[in-house]
Image (spheres, rainbow, N blue to C red):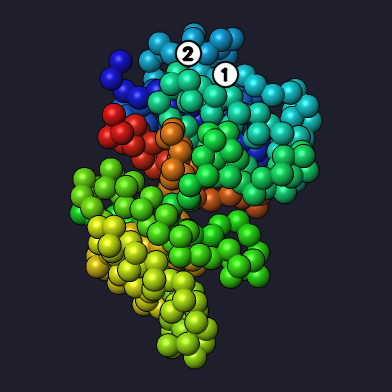
């Protein structure tokens, strides 16, 4: 079969994940590009089906091998069960360690299948980081957990957003899930160069050409030559020069407020952000529900929605499914172009 086989993890079942999966499954566009199996609890999926009234059937598969030959259909969701029935007692839209455990269990199963090349890629529904920690899994999120499972140390989160038919933007983050107070001591020239190389590679794969990369400053006005901080002079600018010498089409550091506008208008294809919100806020303003989270540096393909568990919307039939469809589309594209 030519269409890639993806595992879609249910994420934290108390959040919007199950609804986004069921909502996306009813769209014929999904089944034109991939085959998929959901990893999670089939009764949770059934609850989402009942809530949304799609009428799709849940087909539980006792062994993964039984799902490999299933043709993708809007009428049937193959589900590979995992985790404990304890999740069925968790209240919707609440931080519950049972939700964190369910998300962890699903990701572990999917990652093992991907590493064994039994599936072509993973798409993850969102987990809640506090619930994950309360379940005694002390990871900042999917990205870091997957990096450990895959045994890699050079990795990054990138948010990817097609802005037009001819222009897409990727934003990679040098530091990620940490307090702002910790960003300064974790920011190094070596880390900036490493993330720039990662974004250069994946954007080349996605777009078919080397990206033009812009690098964010850390301080207001790019530090004003040291007046508002010297990280641009000591850390960021040397990293840009090193990356240039390595052959990357890269420039900066630039003040982030103007750099993001320049990237939006087509001057840059990729941005290297120094910390989480510096990249996330801009890209989500440009396209909150079309942005896709891609983990760079893994030996497997993993994408995700760019939003969280959205407890304010969860289990009310109001979850947005565009992000899940985009994550599935980009995962399918990456699996094809990787090969």
Figure check: 331 above or below 284: above
Front one among 57 and 160: 160
Q: Quadrant of residue 273?
A: bottom left
Front one among 280 and 312: 280
Q: Quadrant of residue 9?
A: top right
Question: Percent from the top left, x then y, of residue 279?
Answer: 46, 63
The residue lying at 48 percent from left, 25 percent from top is: 115
Q: Earlier in the sequence, mark 1 or mark 2?
A: 2
Front one among 339 and 306: 339
Looking at the image, residue 51 sits to the left or right of residue 91; the answer is left
The quarter of the rendered structure image containing the N terminus is top left
Q: Which residue is mark 1?
A: 80
The residue lying at 56 percent from left, 10 percent from top is: 63
Residues at marks 1 and 2, CA–CA distance in whole angstroms? 8 Å
Q: Quadrant of residue 105?
A: top right
Question: Percent from the top left, x then y, of residue 78?
Answer: 51, 18
CB within 8 Å, label 1 to label 2 = yes
The residue lying at 25 percent from left, 57 percent from top is: 247
Which of the numbered marks, if any, corresponds to residue 199?
A: none
Q: Which residue is mark 2?
A: 67
Q: Residue furthest bottom?
A: 227
The quarter of the rendered structure image containing the C terminus is top left
Question: Percent from the top left, x then y, of residue 280?
Answer: 49, 61
Looking at the image, residue 235 sits to the left or right of residue 166; the answer is right
Front one among 285 and 47: 285
């Amino acid at each position: 079969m030519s269409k890639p086989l993806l595992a879609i993890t249910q994420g934290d079942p108390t959040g919007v994940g199950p609804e986004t999966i069921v909502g996306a499954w009813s769209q014929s566009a999904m089944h034109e590009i991939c085959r998929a199996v959901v990893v999670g609890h089939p009764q949770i999926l059934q609850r989402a089906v009942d809530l949304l009234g799609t009428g799709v059937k849940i087909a539980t598969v006792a062994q993964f091998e039984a799902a490999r030959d299933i043709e993708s259909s809007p009428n049937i969701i193959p589900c590979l069960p995992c985790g404990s029935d304890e999740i069925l007692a968790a209240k919707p839209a609440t931080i519950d360690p049972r939700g964190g455990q369910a998300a962890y269990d699903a990701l572990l199963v999917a990652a093992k299948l991907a590493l064994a090349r039994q599936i072509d890629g993973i798409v993850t529904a969102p987990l809640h980081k506090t619930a994950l920690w309360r379940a005694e899994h002390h990871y900042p999120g999917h990205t870091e957990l997957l990096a450990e499972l895959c045994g890699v140390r050079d990795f990054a989160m990138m948010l990817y957003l097609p802005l037009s038919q001819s222009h897409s933007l990727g934003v990679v983050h040098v530091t990620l899930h940490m307090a702002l107070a910790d960003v300064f001591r974790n920011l190094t020239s070596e880390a900036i160069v490493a993330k720039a190389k990662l974004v250069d590679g994946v954007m080349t794969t996605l777009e078919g050409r080397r990206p033009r990369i812009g690098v964010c400053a850390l301080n207001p006005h790019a530090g004003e030559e040291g007046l508002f901080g010297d990280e641009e002079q000591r850390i960021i600018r040397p990293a840009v020069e090193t990356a240039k010498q390595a052959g990357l089409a890269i420039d900066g550091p630039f003040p982030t407020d103007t750099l993001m506008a320049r990237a939006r208008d087509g001057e840059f294809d990729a941005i290297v952000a120094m910390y989480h919100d510096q990249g996330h806020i801009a890209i989500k303003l440009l396209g909150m529900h079309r942005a896709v989270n891609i983990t760079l540096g893994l030996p497997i393909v993993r994408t995700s929605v760019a939003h969280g568990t959205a407890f304010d919307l969860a289990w009310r039939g109001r979850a947005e499914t565009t992000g899940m469809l985009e994550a599935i589309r980009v995962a399918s594209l990456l699996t094809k172009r990787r090969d």
